[in-house]
Image (cartoon, grey):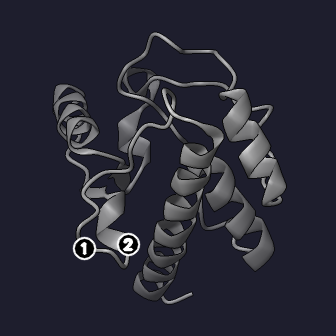
Amino acid sequence: MAEGIFAKMIAEREHGDFFDVESAGTVCFQKGEPPDSRAIEIALEHGVTIADKRACCIRDLELGLYTRIYAMDGQNYHDTIRCSTSQRTLLPVSMVTDYLSDPDTVAIEDPYYGTKKDFLKVFQQLEEALVNIYDELLRQSDL
């Protein structure tokens, strides 16, 4: 959902030439799979189309092409650092939750074993955090 939300922001704010967004997992057994149907449904209800997306593995990305990585939880954070180190690429890795207004939220929980309501919560958390990330990146770039 994160990639779709961010891509929609880019399109709406017309900064497509500035951002290149990729979403990838650190657990790669779902590589090539479409998003969960509940994620597709929640995203579509909010004007975000993700049905055409496919799961990607971070090990398949050339991390040196990116300037920042954002992780959803502590395990993803540590796995991402290990992966970038193995590629001899040291990128700034930040937690998505650092951009939420609730300082007690330390992870964006995987809603897979939950209900549609859990997917909605994740969508809302991502939307809030990604607006803040987007605005920060724009400020840093002087756009």
Foreground of the two, 64 or 71: 71
At 43% from the left and 16% from the top, the residue drawn is 28
Residue 138 visible at all: yes
Judge whether 96 appears above or below 72 on screen: below
Would you call the spot at circle 1 few (<14 residues within 10 Å), some (14-19), or many (20 or more)? Answer: few
**Residues under numbered marks 1 and 2 in contact, where contact means CB atoms less than 8 Å apart:** yes
Q: How many marks?
A: 2
Residue 16 visible at all: no
Q: Please give the label number shown on residue 49.
A: none
- Tell me the distance, in whole angstroms, between the alpha carbons under discs 1 and 2: 7 Å
Q: Is residue 128 left or right of residue 70?
A: right
Residue 131 on image: x %, y %? 54, 74
Foreground of the two, 17 or 23: 23
Residue 67 on image: x %, y %? 38, 56
Q: Is residue 34 left or right of residue 31?
A: right
- Would you identify the image quadrant in which residue 64 lies? top left
Residue 124 on image: x %, y %? 57, 63
Tag 1's secondary structure? loop
At 33% from the left and 62% from the top, the residue drawn is 97
Would you call the spot at circle 2 few (<14 residues within 10 Å), some (14-19), or many (20 or more)? Answer: many
Q: Which residue is mark 2?
A: 100
Residue 139 on image: x %, y %? 45, 88
Judge whether 88 appears above or below 42 on screen: above
At 51% from the left and 59% from the top, the residue drawn is 126
The amino acid marked with disc number 2 is: Leu
Q: Please give the label number shown on residue 103.
A: 1
At 29% from the left and 68% from the top, the residue drawn is 98
The amino acid marked with disc number 1 is: Pro
Q: Is residue 27 left or right of residue 17?
A: left
